[in-house]
Amino acid sequence: MKRHYERRIATVLAVASVALWPQHAPAVEMVRPSLVVYVIENKSLTADRLTIPETIVNAELLRRGYRIVPSLFTPDVARQIAPDVKGVWNADRRMSFQQHFRADLLWMSTVEYTLDSTSRPDSVSGKVSVVARALNTATGESLWFGRVSDRPFKGATPADAARLALAEIIPALVADFDRAPKVRAWTPPERPPASPSALTPGARLPGMTAAPTPVSPSGSPYTGVIIDARDLPVQPNYRTGIYTPQGTPLYSPERQRLNWSDSLPNARQQAGPNPLVIRPQSGQGGRIILRENDARTLQGEKSLRERKPPTVIVRPPKR
């Protein structure tokens, strides 16, 4: 009888140890969706684009492990393929979007600034409101919605005031998005394999959410351009341009927006499997200067420069 009870106790302990301490259970890694970021700003502060909220959103999403798909939304393109300001996304627009971007989610937000009547050129105050939502590009379903209303802002210039306010608002919205149950429950859709003729020779498909960028019609071996500026005092800014040592613009901020990243692996996801990687000679403010040899190489890749903007790697901000 004693041995019988000892065997039963040993069995119960063994089952409990497996249930409570599953030493051999495989770890489940969360698959993060890729996103295209689209931000609409009102023009109450200035006739030009005032700040760079897309850059702040991109940096926060990259920091949390999401992949950013570069976008070049113009007002004309947005009217054809993006949802309206209320987030309504009909099937025709969504299908057009899918033809332009291989992204899993669309992050769309509106930023509205309102100046106080007491604002002066050397002291600006007012309020900013941000409405943001994330939509599934395959179904059009809204996975998350966030809003911050009438947040006061103040600064020496409109740009400084708005930038300081957005630096607080957007990280909080991204954190809330990252916690959203529907975002956490998102699973990759089943997509048909890309046509072999559209793939770069030797490209690896496992783990990729989008097909590699095809080789340019001119026969260029490069799928994109990466400017590694991590050793320079350069920070994301839509007014940044890339120049030759003589000052000739290779990428002008008036014509092209640069993509930004905080690591080489993330930059490669944007630039493709075989990018042209360049370390610039110098950079400060809104100017990145290339070395003579690199500038000549890039000048000879006209089709590459026209096909997609480069991705600039900068040091991630200190936390």
Image: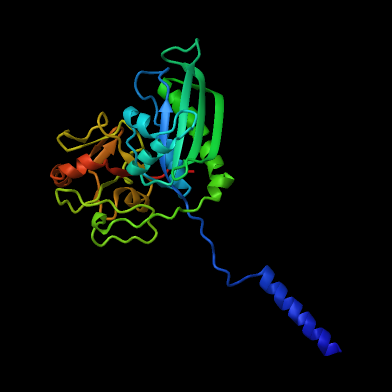
**Rendered residue at 40%/28% (across/down):** 51
Q: Can residue 291 be seen in this snapshot?
A: no
Towards the viewer: 102 or 259: 102
Q: Who's the residue at 35% across and 52% down the image?
A: 210
Q: Quadrant of residue 248?
A: top left
- Residue situated furthest top in the rendering: 117
Position of the N terminus by quadrant: bottom right
Asked if residue 200 can be seen in this view, the reply is: yes
| Left or right: residue 306 compared with residue 48 | left
Provide residue 26's location: percent of width, then percent of height.
54, 68
Q: Residue furthest front?
A: 92
Residue 199: x, y in percent? Answer: 26, 56
Q: Nearer the viewer, residue 92 or 87?
A: 92
Q: Nearer the viewer, residue 231 or 51?
A: 51
How is the model colour-coded?
A: rainbow
Return the residue nearer the eye: 122 or 254.
254
Q: Is residue 262 above or below residue 283?
A: below
Q: Is residue 16 left or right of residue 299?
A: right
Left or right position of 230 against 223? right
Total tally of numbered discs in the picture: 0
Q: Where residue 207 appears, x then y in whole percent?
A: 39, 59
Residue 42 versus residue 275 in the image, above or below: above
Which quadrant would residue 159 be assigned to in this image?
Answer: top left
